Image: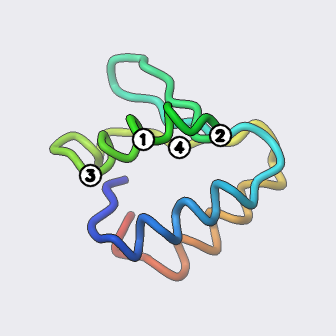
């Protein structure tokens, strides 16, 4: 998943903030970015906007939080 513009980033972070549980990005190297941590979020957004942003895997601790991202992906299908 690679975020491609400022509006998509804002909507993505809105989905992250709406989640009750942990939200994570995993790189191909096994690095985990906790999107609920502000510092880690900055690093993760940089990775998403970078050259390898499409290699990151998104996952949630709570299954009910996945709905926030389904809504995000429905609104921004170009991200997938």
Label 2: which residue? 36
Query: What secondary structure is found at the residue carrying circle 1?
Result: helix
Left or right of residue 58: residue 53? left
Give the CA separation, mark 4 to mark 3.
14 Å
Looking at the image, is mark 1 or mark 2 earlier in the sequence?
2
Looking at the image, is mark 4 or mark 2 earlier in the sequence?
2
Q: In which quarter of the image is residue 6?
A: bottom left
**Number of numbered discs:** 4
Query: What secondary structure is found at the residue carrying circle 2?
Result: loop
Give the CA separation, mark 2 to mark 3.
18 Å
Q: Are marks 2 and 3 in contact (CB under 8 Å)?
A: no
* Residue at x-position 70% and y-position 65%: 68
Looking at the image, is mark 4 or mark 3 earlier in the sequence?
3
Q: Give the percent coordinates (x, y) of residue 48.
A: 33, 47
Label 3: which residue? 49
Give the CA separation, mark 4 to mark 2.
13 Å
Pointer 3 local density, CA inside 10 Å: few below 14, some 14–19, many at least 20:
some
> What's the mark number on residue 58?
4
* Residue at x-position 53% and y-position 43%: 58
Label 1: which residue? 42
Looking at the image, is mark 3 or mark 1 earlier in the sequence?
1
């Amino acid at each position: 998943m690679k975020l491609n513009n400022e509006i998509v980033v804002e909507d993505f972070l809105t989905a992250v903030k709406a989640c009750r549980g942990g939200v994570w990005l995993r790189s191909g190297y096994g690095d985990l970015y906790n999107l609920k941590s502000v510092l880690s979020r900055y690093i993760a957004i940089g990775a998403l906007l970078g050259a390898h942003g499409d290699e990151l895997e998104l996952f949630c601790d709570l299954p009910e939080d996945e709905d926030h991202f389904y809504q995000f992906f429905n609104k921004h299908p170009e991200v997938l």
